[in-house]
């Protein structure tokens, strides 16, 4: 009998094991749903898969009377727009501020403690301030996302910059590089893969802020829809929406990972 | 011509004296090796020569001029590790210095200029034995190959002084031996001054023309940090006149062989006049 950590599954077995929990969760839901539906056919808490499908087809293919839009696509478009704007602004801010502040000792001494304190402010706690300052429109939602994730990205980039070996920076100087040339030729390219990682890690938080902002005030969006139909206990909308959001988040994560692999082959080699 | 002078250089961190009264003057085309126990300040000495750190007292002169207060292109360096850029290919690494010098904003050459630089860099890479690895990334190279790359990267800038901080410390003995040969040859070919830090004595005396030992001359057991290290011995490892006569001999042999090789092709009456010209040349 070996120690349990020394048993590793073969690739085929590994695949089956990976799928297993998903199957189990689906099966439990199906059993529970069938049992409830058998007692009360109009049960709203655990609808059948057929009703999920019907609802989603309806939301994706029929024009909603109130908004004159295909709701599923309209909601997805609004939420993704907010998410991408928020993430994009945060990434650019994180990259620029992170590199400049991380690389120039005077700026670092000035701003590092400030950013550290700033990143500890809970973004949702200042949401009312944002609503007051930026109104209830799109601006406050995007500022919320930026407020929530930019400090994290800035700090991450800054750490990455300071983790670059001093030897490299000295070497660059002995090759005659100016500060700008070191930033553009040594620091930036080496920080980029890390920035992509940090954006990947921020995806969850970004979705959280999008949904939170939409839940409070909005005219559309995935989070808005979920909180709207909650009043009618419409689990046939909420659950597929949650799965749809998860799928979108997964796809974005996957795309970023592929981007890092394609754009920075040297980083992969180094990691291996 | 490159001469280096240390004029009564001290290095102190707060109360701790690391180096004291370092006086040294180094002729052109010397291979200076600094030896000494770990943590005594060998690397500090090298860092001051690199302007990575400033002396607390005294000054360092190259060719009679005080050195710049930050690292510049006249002093190349190879560290024990991390001297190459992981995000550029081998060829890209070698091309960085000249591109920075020639393209302040973009740091990149295009067209004919790039082609010319590529050729120059490839020639240098072939010289250090990395010709067929030009398009790999540094992480795909062995430790010895990375150090060869770091050397090529520094040499393309034609520095007056090349500083080596335990460059072979992390290499296995076989690789180390071939690196010794390479560095020795490069030193001869480029006629520059090399300053190397090591704690391997055989290596020091194999490569160096001058070897200095750095250690504490006096020690106060009550206050071990009161006194710093200084140069305690200074060996002329390879006598300059011997070195120069050897160089001269080598040059003479080379010219003679060249003449011998050229003679049969041109002259109708081969051997005798060729020998005569060779002798006259001498």
Image (spheres, rainbow, N blue to C red):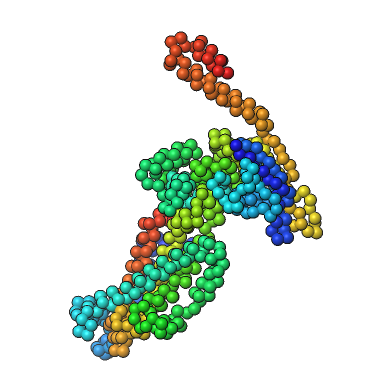
Task: Tell me if residue A172 comes above or below residue B256 in the rendering.
Answer: below
Q: Is residue B139 visible?
A: no
Q: Residue furthest front?
A: B65
Quadrant of the snapshot with the N terminus of chain B: top right
Tell me which residue sits at (52%, 44%) in the image.
B154
The percent coordinates of residue A240 (x first, y second) are 29, 78
Lateral position of residue A157 relative to residue B3, left or right:
left
Percent of width and height locating residue B276: 54, 12
Q: How many marks?
A: 0
- Indicate the quadrant where residue A92 lies: bottom left
The relative height of residue B173 versus residue A110 in the rendered view (above or below) is: above
Answer with the quarter of the image where residue B33 lies.
top right
Residue under the point 48% across and 37% down: B127
Q: Residue at x 65, y 37 (%)?
A: B27
Please indicate whether residue A127 sits to the left or right of residue A165 in the image: left
Residue at x-position 53% and y-position 69% = A111
């Amino acid at each position: 009998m070996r120690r349990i950590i020394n048993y590793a599954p073969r690739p085929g077995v590994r695949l089956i094991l990976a799928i297993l929990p998903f199957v189990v969760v689906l099966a439990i839901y199906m059993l529970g749903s069938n049992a409830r539906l058998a007692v009360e056919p109009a049960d709203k808490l655990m609808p059948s898969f057929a009703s999920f499908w019907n609802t989603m087809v309806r939301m994706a293919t029929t024009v909603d009377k109130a908004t004159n839009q295909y709701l599923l696509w309209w909601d997805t478009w609004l939420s993704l727009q907010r998410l991408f704007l928020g993430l994009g602004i945060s990434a650019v801010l994180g990259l620029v501020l992170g590199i400049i502040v991380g690389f120039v000792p005077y700026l670092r001494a000035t701003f590092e403690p400030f950013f550290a304190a700033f990143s500890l402010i809970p973004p949702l706690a200042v949401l009312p301030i944002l609503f007051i300052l930026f109104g209830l429109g799109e601006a406050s939602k995007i500022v919320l996302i930026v407020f929530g994730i930019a400090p994290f990205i800035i700090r991450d980039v800054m750490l990455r910059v300071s983790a670059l070996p001093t030897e490299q920076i000295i070497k660059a100087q002995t090759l005659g590089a100016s500060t700008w040339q070191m930033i553009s030729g040594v620091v930036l390219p080496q920080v980029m893969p890390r920035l992509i990682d940090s954006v990947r890690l921020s995806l969850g938080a970004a979705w959280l802020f999008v949904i939170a902002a939409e839940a409070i005030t909005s005219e559309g969006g995935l989070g808005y829809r979920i909180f709207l139909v909650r009043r009618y206990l419409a689990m046939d909308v909420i659950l597929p929406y949650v799965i749809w959001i998860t799928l979108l988040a997964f796809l974005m994560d996957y795309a970023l990972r592929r981007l890092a692999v394609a754009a920075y082959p040297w980083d992969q080699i180094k990691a291996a | 011509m490159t001469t280096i002078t240390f004029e009564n250089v001290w290095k102190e961190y707060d109360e701790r004296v690391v180096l004291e009264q370092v006086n040294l003057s180094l002729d052109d085309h010397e291979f200076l090796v600094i030896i000494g126990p770990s943590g005594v300040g060998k690397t500090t000495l090298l860092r001051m020569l690199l302007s990575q750190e400033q002396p607390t007292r005294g000054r360092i002169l190259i060719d009679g001029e005080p050195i710049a207060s930050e690292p510049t292109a006249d002093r190349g360096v190879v560290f024990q590790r991390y001297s190459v850029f992981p995000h550029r290919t081998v060829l890209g690494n070698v091309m960085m210095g000249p591109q920075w010098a020639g393209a302040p904003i973009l740091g990149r050459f295009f067209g004919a200029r790039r082609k010319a630089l590529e050729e120059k860099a490839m020639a240098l890479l072939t010289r250090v034995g990395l010709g067929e690895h030009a398009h790999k990334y540094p992480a795909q190279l062995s430790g010895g190959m990375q150090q060869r790359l770091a050397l090529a990267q520094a040499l393309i800038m034609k520095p007056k002084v090349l500083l080596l901080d335990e460059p072979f410390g992390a290499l296995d003995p076989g690789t180390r031996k071939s690196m010794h040969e390479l560095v020795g040859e490069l030193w001869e070919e480029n006629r520059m001054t090399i300053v190397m830090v090591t704690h391997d004595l055989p290596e020091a005396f194999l490569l160096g023309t001058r070897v200095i030992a750095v250690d504490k001359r006096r020690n106060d057991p009550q206050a071990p940090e009161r006194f710093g290290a200084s140069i305690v011995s200074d060996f002329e490892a390879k006598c300059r006149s011997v070195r120069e006569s050897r160089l001269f001999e080598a040059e003479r042999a080379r010219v003679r062989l060249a003449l011998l090789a050229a003679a049969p092709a041109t002259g109708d009456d081969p051997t005798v006049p060729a020998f005569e010209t060779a002798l006259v040349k001498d």
